[in-house]
Amino acid sequence: MVMKQSRTTLKDLAEDLNLSPSTISRALANHPAISDATKKKVQKKAEELGFIPNSIASSFRKKKSQSIGVIVPRIDIHFHSLVISGIEEFAYKTGYNVTIFQSKDSTTREKEIVKLLQNKMVEGVIICLAIETYDYDHFKKFKKLGVPLVFYDRVPSNYDTNKIVINDFESAFKATEHLIKRGCKRIAHIAGNQSTPIFKERLEGYKSAIRKHNLSFDEKLIIPCKSLSYEEGVQCAESFLKFSSIPDGIFCANDYTAVSVIQVFRKAGMRIPEDTAVVGFSNYPISRVIEPHLTTINDRAFQMGVEASKLLIRLIEDEKRTLKSETISLETELIVRESSMKD
Amino acid sequence: MVMKQSRTTLKDLAEDLNLSPSTISRALANHPAISDATKKKVQKKAEELGFIPNSIASSFRKKKSQSIGVIVPRIDIHFHSLVISGIEEFAYKTGYNVTIFQSKDSTTREKEIVKLLQNKMVEGVIICLAIETYDYDHFKKFKKLGVPLVFYDRVPSNYDTNKIVINDFESAFKATEHLIKRGCKRIAHIAGNQSTPIFKERLEGYKSAIRKHNLSFDEKLIIPCKSLSYEEGVQCAESFLKFSSIPDGIFCANDYTAVSVIQVFRKAGMRIPEDTAVVGFSNYPISRVIEPHLTTINDRAFQMGVEASKLLIRLIEDEKRTLKSETISLETELIVRESSMKD
DNA sequence: CTGAAAGCGCTTACAG
DNA sequence: CTGAAAGCGCTTACAG
């Protein structure tokens, strides 16, 4: 039966060395006013006694928790795990801890977490909104508390705050234009949930490219999905195959549905990309595995995390709160692979 | 320029209500000794003033941080993101926070993080070892501090601690035996790094099934890989195709290499599963997408996280430290899909 | 260069 | 049922 031993404290060190706690504290913090001799002595004794500073006491005293909160819909979605990875990477280097919460895409749970975070004294919060969150009142309290927020991916609309996004409109435009340049004349779009801004933007980008290049616009070629799941992709693909004139290009709002299209079309005897070229969105690992490899948009998930972290920490360390709200838009990149390489 | 406003404290509430801070504290903690009338009054005033308890002060005072640390090699590996998701899920329900760190598979960084966690006053730590960690001295301090540890997946050998694992030997045995029962006579194995216990076990499980069923054992049919990457899988598959007698079954130590095998073999005109049946390991999302769908082992990543969290919190709340070290071995499950459905 | 003292915001054993 | 008091382990303004 091992009893929890009480830790060595500053006071213990002080008594051992016949110095005051103040001096010990300063010596360990490498304060310029302390002599090198004393610093060495303190360091040595600290080592000897296995002194570990109680950072909760320190946080409490300094009112700086050195930790940031992150709310994601789910950790196990690859996109978010990449973002978190980027957040942790930058935060670690800067000395901040990252505490993670999953909203499970429930606004109720998001609100619960927000409350929790308010008394956890995190110094800042990075958030991807739950899918059904349209009201941002629960975040207002953070402003009062002087706790900066940075949203990414699913960000609030009409709410003055910090955001890290990609340009969905332009990315979709790029993807669609690529298909046009490869000679596609009848391009379909598997669209995402139109109540989510990013998917709306992707649809608009698609439309804009179609218009710019004077292709005939056909409403039937746009199929909106609820969750863009693999299964929904299969359904969309099957509908397309029933058209009297099957699309010769398909721009999908994510990679899952693009993969479904490729598989369903191939099974039906269509050649990809010769008969129908396909472009996805997100550059999921699967896009390099599916045959043919999928042309897609690199949505910069990792970098999004790094930027969110960087911006948040900049805001935290701007003690005077002089910085204005900022929106950072990351450049995406069209990754061309076999699924669209016709000609 | 918004100034950080100072928060309302217990003392403020006390003064407002002409009660002592002790009473306020107890009222908010729903202490039985406090009258309902007082509790109501306090609750109401707290609401009114937007009182948010300072949980750092509370943690400090109670010496309970209500938070656990998690060290994973990388967050963006699907397996780990599932585990973390499971950890967060259970911890959240129990009121613990989860602070995440990535070792990047570097023992040096792992040691740094361990130091950090020791003064962060986390109440427990869940760890998947960095790949090159063979020495566990840096974890010993936690025992002295009374901070319980739970390892998962890559766990220490010869070190008395808590572990959550799956039975790799048995899982591999099951997978191989499945191939044998499907009529395979010449079964190859793409093996993982043999200095990692889990991959050693998988190889042993494979061997054991071969022996049990009296298949002829051929050392050439076992190819060990460094990292079991998709690319290494391609190389293995190409070697197999050069054999005078090509394997009619392949058990791969992970899903990536299994996917490579399927693709390379198909391109070479082999039929899967008719000519060669393939089984992977881990049940990655890709296994339900690759054609034919991949037979694989469900390695229970999410559940592993839940169990790790559950065990850790049980240990934390066992104030007297009466619990002995425990190893929990999770049942895996063979998921049979088309890649092995011959006959 | 070092120390004494106050205090961060809570909780809790003790007293009544 | 409520309160006064001590104290958790640090940090820092003030003094010397």
Image (spheres, coloured by chain):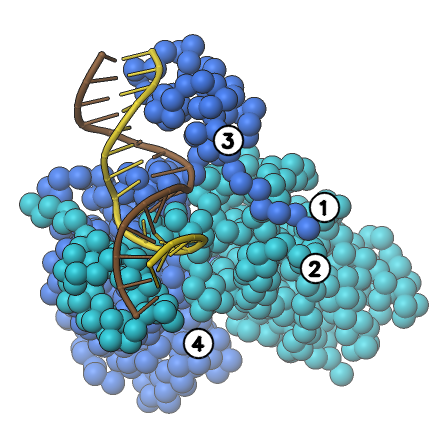
Chain colours: A blue, B cyan, C yellow, D brown
Mark identifier at residue B327: 2
- In percent of width and height, residue B120 lies at 44, 43
Amino acid residing under circle 1? Tyr
Q: Is residue D13 left or right of residue A178?
A: left
Front label number (4 vs 1): 1
Residue nearest the observer in this picture, D4 or A221: D4
Q: Chain of mark 3?
A: A
Label 4 secondary element = helix
Q: Which residue shows up at 62% across the image and 44% down it?
A: B143
Q: Chain of mark 4?
A: A
- Count neighbours of disc 3 (C-alpha within 10 A) and say few if under 14, some if 14 to 19, many if 20 or more: some
Number of the front mark, 2 or 3:
3
Q: What secondary structure is found at the residue carrying circle 3? A: loop
Kindly indicate whether the residues beneath marks 1 and 2 are on one polypeptide chain.
yes
Left or right: B272 in relation to A94 = right
The subunit letter for the residue under badge 1 reads B
Q: Determine whether the residue tagged by mark 2 lies in a helix, strand or loop.
A: strand
Disc 4 crowd rating (10 Å Cα; few below 14, some 14-19, many 20+) is: some
Select label 3 or label 1 by which is in front.
3
Which picture quadrant has residue B278? Answer: bottom right
Type of amino acid at the residue the image marks with label 4? Tyr
Judging by the rendered image, the residue that carries numbered circle 4 is A230
x, y (%) of residue B342?
73, 80
Inspect the image, locate mark 3, and give the three-letter code of the amino acid beneath it: Phe
Kindly identify which chain the residue marked by label 2 belongs to.
B
Q: Quadrant of the C terminus of chain A?
A: bottom left
Q: Secondary structure at mark 1?
A: loop
The relative height of residue A62 versus residue B73 in the rendered view (above or below) is above
User: Which residue in the structure is indicated by mark 1?
Assistant: B159
Horizontal and vertical percent for residue B40? Answer: 24, 74
Q: Label 3 belongs to which residue?
A: A51
Q: Residue type at mark 2: give it.
A: Thr
